[in-house]
Amino acid sequence: MASVRLVRSYSRRLQVKRVGTSYKRNLDWKPYQVTNLFSTSADTANDERKSQNESKDSNFKLFSELSKLRLSALVVATSSAGFLAAGCAPISWATLSACSFGTALCASSAATFNQVFEIDRDALMKRTRNRPLPSKKVSKEGAIALGLSTGITGTAVLALGTDPVTTALGCGNIALYAGLYTYMKPRSEANTWVGAVVGAIPPVMGWTAAGGSMIDPEAILLGGTLFLWQFPHFFALSWMHRVDYARGGFQMVPCNDNPAGDRTAALINRYTWYLSSIPLISTALGVTNSMFAVEGLVLNAYALYVAKNFDKERSNGNARKVFLTSLWYLPCLMTLFILHSKHWREDVTEEEVRIDLHAYIQKKINQIRLKGRELCIHESAVVKEREDKCPVTISRETTAHAALPDIVISSTSNEQQNNNPSS
């Protein structure tokens, strides 16, 4: 270090320029340049290793941006939720892995092709101009190669690891998102409804991969949840970025709405109310137990609250609250759907738990259900001794047996009258 400082000091004295009859210090001189003369082979190796790591990080970042990694992760989560909601015993972990991995690759392919087709429009928008394709960090040919490879591989994984219906849904969703949805974005506001269909398919893929049918009530409810959820989510997002979307030439409802945002606010409120009915419909159809309806009231009450606030004041701040609420609302609702699904058994033995991971998961779900029952005000205050305690559940049973005591009393009175002639 002393030698480095000596060279810096000596070199600094030499870095002068003659200007006319005076001398002027060269302020452009950088003293750290001479330190390379004293670098060791270990330093060079460390620099090369650091450069390689930065290159790997850069490549992964480019891949994640082209694949819209966070969006793909959400897609995988919903498909896995659809699979687990089936409660199939035993769980086929190989099938679940194939469904999740194949869905992730198909989502990556669709996102990549979407960006390939929208390079020029993305370059016009502030929030997308730094993406790999508009910024020239990745060539168009390279992006196409990535989209093809992930799409073909994802379809192959679904075909080998799941079933033809799930495979067709995964492959079709690539065409629907990268094709029809992308084509409609600059042409019609209906693109949002097409995009909602795209988002509704992954949980149905999970359900069919587990052995269910597309027309099962569970599949329709799971897909319907994702379909309805996307409207408050996306309308809030597009309201915050309405100027940017208009700059890119996209036909979004907030872009074409009046300055007050009447249509946007009405749509957010309407679809939030529609979404709030899912727990009630699910319980009425017998797909989930009654606690799903009770707990869903809490989630939906807050979702309706933030939607109502946006309706009162159409500010970006309130739109952001709607958007952020949608981010935690969906995983909470899907988790509750799985926990309260009637496909999960409650009579799990300790022997099954020891030898079967699926039975272990069932036991944990039953423990969570029991804890929820203990926290239920209705159960603790009204019907503590009942196994299925909440009055929402026992109301039909109570109604069905309500007339029985009257019949017994009536017959008893007739017997008393027959045995007592004086009466």
Image (tube, grey):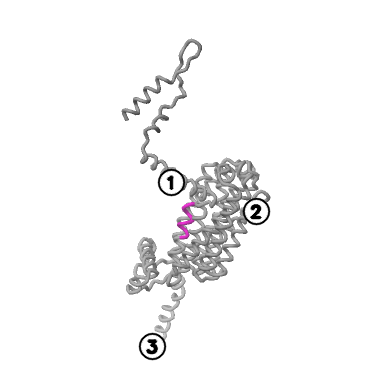
Q: Is residue 373 left or right of residue 173?
A: left
For residue 257: magenta?
A: no
Task: Give the number of the mark in front: 2 or 1.
Answer: 1
Residue 22: x %, y % from top left: 47, 11
Secondary structure, mark 1, is helix
Q: Amino acid at mark 3?
A: Ser
Q: Is residue 374 left or right of residue 218?
A: left
Query: Which of the 4 quarters of the picture holds residue 295?
Result: bottom left
Q: Amino acid at mark 1?
A: Asn
Secondary structure, mark 3, is loop
Say if mark 3 contacts mark 2, CB within 8 Å: no
The reply to whether residue 274 is visible in this rendering is no
How far is disc 1 from disc 3 in space, using C-alphas? 104 Å
Residue 372: x %, y % from top left: 38, 62
Quadrant of image for the N terminus? top left
Q: Is residue 84 above or below residue 319?
A: below
Residue 406: x %, y % from top left: 43, 78
Front-most of residues 357 and 231:
357
How far is disc 2 from disc 1 in space, using C-alphas? 44 Å
Q: Which residue is mark 2?
A: 190
How far is disc 3 from disc 2 in space, using C-alphas? 83 Å
Quadrant of image for the C terminus? bottom left
- Magenta residues span 327-334
**Dominant secondary-structure state across the stretch colored magenta:** helix
Q: Which residue is mark 1?
A: 53
- Label 1 or label 3, whichever comes before in sequence order: 1
The reply to whether residue 23 is visible in this rendering is yes
Secondary structure, mark 2, is loop
Label count reads 3
Q: Which residue is mark 3?
A: 422
